[in-house]
Image (cartoon, grey):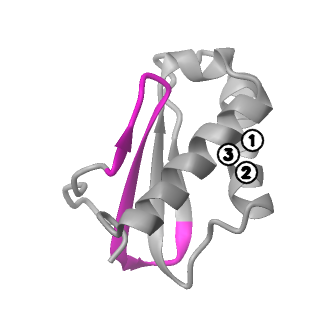
Amino acid sequence: MSQQKLPKYFYSSKNLRLFYIASEPSGLRLSVPKKFFRLAVDRNKIKRQIKEIFRTNGLYFQKGCFIVMVYKPFCELSYREASFEIVKAVKSSLNNNKALK
């Protein structure tokens, strides 16, 4: 994604914020800021967890790109809680067709 403005998010909580860009090629982009997670080990662990959640639950689509911005309270979630929150957010947006047209 080039230097363009992000669309309005379709899910937001104290842990993360999700965006969807239909015009981008399929994929997943993660933003885990160094400001909140100083150690690279922590940032990489969070990225691996989110990628695995998307992979195991089949949340990738043929067209469109998800952008996930992670906030500090995310590290307090267990894998199961994080998985539940992400899956719930993506699937509810599919059912409502608000963000994913």
* Residue type, mark 1 in image: Gln
Residue drawn 57% across the image and 77% down it: 61
User: Residue 49, which numbered label?
Assistant: 1
Name the element at disc 3: helix
Q: Nearer the viewer, residue 52 or 101?
A: 101
Residue behind mark 3: 50
Q: CA distance from mark 1 to mark 2?
A: 6 Å
Q: Position of residue 72 (x, y in %)?
A: 52, 17
Residue drawn 41% across the image and 29% down it: 13
Q: Position of residue 11 (x, y in %)?
A: 38, 44
Q: CA distance from mark 3 to mark 2?
A: 5 Å
Whether residues under marks 3 and 2 lie with C-beta atoms below 8 angstroms apart, the answer is yes
Residue 72 in the figure: left or right of residue 81: left
User: Residue 53, which numbered label?
Assistant: 2
The magenta segment is: 10-27
* Residue type, mark 2 in image: Ile
